[in-house]
Amino acid sequence: MAAAEPAVPALPSGGGAGAPSGTVPVLFCFSVFARPAAVPHGAGYELLIQKFLSLYGDQIDMHRKFVVQLFAEEWGQYVDLPKGFAVSERCKVRLVPLQIQLTTLGNLTPSSTVFFCCDMQERFRPAIKYFGDIISVGQRLLQGARILGIPVIVTEQYPKGLGSTVQEIDLTGVKLVLPKTKFSMVLPEVEAALAEIPGVRSVVLFGVETHVCIQQTALELVGRGIEVHIVADATSSRSMMDRMFALERLARTGIIVTTSEAVLLQLVADKDHPKFKEIQTLIKASAPESGLLSKV
């Protein structure tokens, strides 16, 4: 058995040479590399994943699943990160790829898929590029979800100031509609709702804004081992530059950037599917291109 790695000596929270006030020094290990960085006191799983991605993003194969482990001085070795872990003192963590690759990458099945509709609100109407097209395609996706029996989770960013979901979006039958102030849709209530749905493997994500709430939601979901499909023709931003650079960045991290028609047809998969005719009727007219073709 190989010798145990030495523990990182514990220091009082918020301390450590070179660490800014209110942060904690953490050693982030991946493969043969080890890089020190500072994280906010109380940082949890999500922030650790984001830091791993910022430090090693070009070396991490996002087609694989990972586990985050913490070096435990008590045992003299790494252990899986405890549930609810929050950084309170100097420590060492590592990102470990699982041996089995995700052979299901890109596959969508109704039984393992949830739709996320993000912040399609009234006050965004005059500001978001091609918002009318985005609404139209979003409504098409929600109709498809109802036909196929796919759960839908909807969020609204600060609805008191930004209004409710636009009237054109029919929320009949959605599993959850939640207000939020956090940019990401990954709220405790959303995590609880996902835990209630057996076998969730994929999230189809659409809404606004691509470079803010969509991007942060996608990265958090990927960090939890969920495959994310972003519907390019159903998401936008106030500027096309932000929209297109976000889609490019997300695609490079292993997130699947796709279209509404591709998603719906992948979910039925076969012309003999009992719901194929209804989906075919839904997509008979092509979805609006919402400015995407001008950027290809």
Image (cartoon, rainbow, N blue to C red):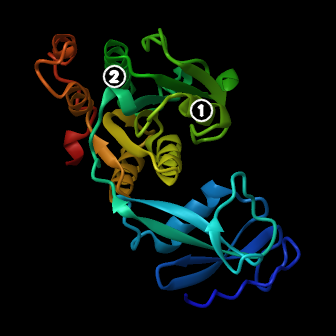
In this rendering, would 272 be left or right of 248? left
Can the viewer see residue 162? Answer: no
Q: Is residue 176 visible?
A: yes
Circle 1/circle 2 CB separation < 8 Å: no
Please tell me whether mark 1 or mark 2 is closer to you in this view: 1
Percent of width and height locating residue 165: 53, 18
- Residue for badge 2: 141
Is tag 1's residue or tag 2's residue first in the polypeptide sequence? 2
Q: Which mark is residue 171?
A: none
| Mark 1 closeness class: few <14, some 14–19, many ≥20 residues within 10 Å | some
Query: Which of the pair 98/19 is nearer the observer?
Result: 98
Q: Residue at x 79, y 86 (%)?
A: 17
Q: Is residue 162 left or right of residue 153?
A: right
Query: Where does label 1 land, which residue?
Result: 190
The residue at 27%/30% (across/down) is 260
The span from disc 1 to disc 2 (Cα, nearest Å) is 19 Å
- Of residues 169 and 145, the one nearer the viewer is 145
Residue at the spot 20% in from the left edge and 27% down from the top edge? 265
Q: Position of residue 170 (x, y in %)?
A: 44, 11
Amino acid under disc 1: Val
- Say what secondary structure mark 2 lies in: helix
Does 29 sit above or below residue 96?
Answer: below
